[in-house]
Image: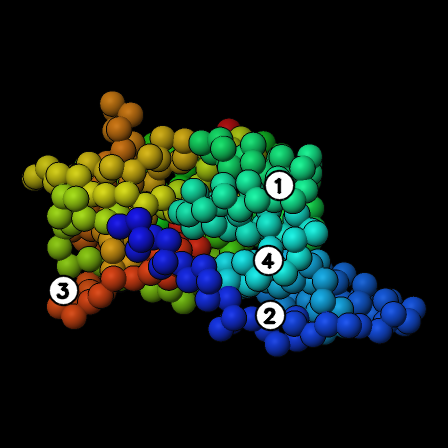
Amino acid sequence: MRRHLILGAGLLAGAAVLPTTAAIGGGDSSANAVDARTDALRLGEEALGRGDAAEAQREFERAGSMQHVADSEMGLVRAYMQAGTYRRALAFAAHTAGAHPETPAGAVLYAWLLHVGGHTAVAQRVLDKTDTRAPGDELTRQARAQLSSPAPVATGALLSAPCRLAPFDAGAPLPATASVIATGTLVDGGRRALILLAAVGHGRALWVRDGLGRRSAASLERQADGLGLALLRLDTPIESTSHLVLAPRDPFAGSAAFAVQYAASIEAAPSWPLLRPGFFGPLHRPDGVATLDIPLSAGTPGGPVFDAAGRLAGIALRGPDSLDRLLTASALRREFGKLLGDVSPDAGVGRATVDVIYEAALRSTLQVISTP
């Protein structure tokens, strides 16, 4: 299992996905060239800020073609993340950290991406090496403090370009009193969401936002009291190219599980979800609830849980005893039917790599935001 988790992300596969322009060295030292490169970096950041990942990628590649420097490469990593291509982002972040050891921010970005994708031990080793090369670096210290906490949240310098450890939300500003109250699961092709019923308060405004920073207001459509869930209808559908596929049967105890959630935070800032690997526990019938051997206590419950094939196995719940449980896909299917997507065939389906599962999670795992 450990070998699968580490190798599955393709941590050393960077050479296969690196953009050709970013590897060009040298660069024109004239004032015009410096101005053009600065302009490309600025335009790339502006494109990210308005949610245009494709334009941001073009501008950061243009900057990288002028000079092989870490700042344009970190911009590209973030453009890949905002486009939902975690595998490409992780591989290029590994290249940036290795090719620019004089820039600790590159290693910090790489470590953060490792951590959110479930590779916490590897992330800590990256920071250890960075401490050896650049002892006393403040950005590394802040990142280590967050990644050592049960609920890492990027704040302060960790949100500054070029090493910004979060996506952008291009929507209108939210009320100052808004906060992230739960994790949700995007269903029905991006038109609806499932959240914990406890997160729905009378008269409260609700929004949902995915790991790419895309946000929509939402309203309660119906309650499933027996499951403790609420079905929300989104005012503006969130396009989901990663169509969820349901597991055809409930998971076996001891099989691999991947739960996704957002870190608990009193603010409503966008962030990347946290994937945590573990195992499914025994299934308790007839309620369709299983135990989860995954440490989720520091996050917000309600997010999707995937099996080893990358199929939706259920939704993570927090029990009255504060233990994490799985509301299985079969229980969800009985209540919500076709809204959950197609059921995967049981035969001929192989294991999915962790990076592929995380890419699906970026689009299907939602921050649930509300005002008091």
Distance from Cα at disc 1 to Cα at disc 2: 36 Å
Distance from Cα at disc 2 to Cα at disc 3: 36 Å
Earlier residue among tags 3 and 4 = 4
Image x and y of residue 7, in percent: 36, 58
Q: Which residue is mark 3?
A: 346
Image x and y of residue 304, in percent: 32, 48
Earlier residue among tags 1 and 4 = 4
Give yes or no for contact between labels 4 and 2 (Cβ–Cβ under 8 Å). no
Eye-nearest disc, 4 or 2? 4
Q: Secondary structure at mark 2?
A: helix
Q: Secondary structure at mark 1?
A: helix
Q: Residue furthest right?
A: 31
Inspect the image, locate mark 4, and give the three-letter code of the amino acid beneath it: Gly
Give yes or no for contact between labels 1 and 3 (Cβ–Cβ under 8 Å). no
Earlier residue among tags 1 and 3 = 1
Give yes or no for contact between labels 1 and 2 (Cβ–Cβ under 8 Å). no
Query: Image point 31% across, 53% down: which residue?
Result: 3
Q: Secondary structure at mark 3?
A: loop
**Label drawn at residue 98:** 4
As drawn, 236 above or below 268: below
Distance from Cα at disc 1 to Cα at disc 3: 48 Å
Inspect the image, locate mark 3, and give the three-letter code of the amino acid beneath it: Asp
Q: Is residue 350 left or right of residue 124?
A: left
